[in-house]
Image: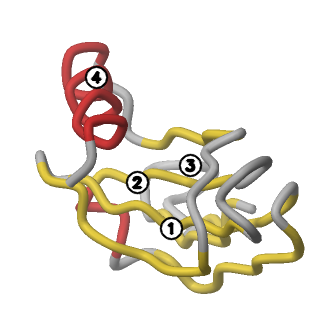
Amino acid sequence: MTYKERELDEMMERRKVDILCVQETKWKESKSRSIGGGFKLFFHGADGKRNGIGVILKEEYVKSVLEVKRVSDRMMSAKLEIEGVCDGGERRILE
């Protein structure tokens, strides 16, 4: 785990954030990995010198990920299916 990942993990725990989108990460490659503290990072970056984006999810939401589209080092989407009480208890898809 890098210093940047550890700092994000600690901030998300402290502020009780479950889903966080990050930009200007400068991380290379298209991967996903656990960053500790019960969080998983999905990210994409081209060259490690500029741009780069990611989505960090609390571990309980990782199993709800239906799809992650990495369009470019400036745009990505994650589709999650979240169950909960809403309009008759139906399931919702978040994009």
- Judged left or right of residue 76, residue 28 is left
Question: Residue 68: where, in percent of width, then height?
Answer: 65, 79
Residue 16, numbered circle: 4
Nearer the observer: mark 1 or 3; the answer is 1
Q: Say which residue label 3 marks.
A: 86
SS at badge 1: strand
Q: Which residue is mark 1?
A: 42
Q: Is residue 43 above or below residue 53?
A: below
What residue lies at 27% left-to-right and 47% top-to-bottom? 2
- As measured in the structure, the alpha-carbon distance from the residue carrying label 2 to the one carrying label 4 is 12 Å
Q: What residue is shown at x 88% (from left), y 76% (from top)? A: 71
In this view, which residue lies farthest toward the bottom? 66
Q: State the residue in front, 77 or 9.
A: 9
Q: Secondary structure at mark 3?
A: loop
First along the sequence among labels 3 and 2 = 2
Left or right placement of residue 14 versus residue 46 in this view: left
Q: In what element is the residue under mark 4?
A: loop
> Going by the picture, which residue comes out furthest to the top?
15
Between the residue at mark 3 and the residue at mark 2, the CA separation in whole angstroms equals 22 Å
Residue type at numbered disc 4: Lys
Q: Secondary structure at mark 2?
A: strand
Type of colouring: secondary structure
Relative height, residue 89 to residue 25 (above, below):
below
**Chain-order first, disc 2 or disc 4:** 4
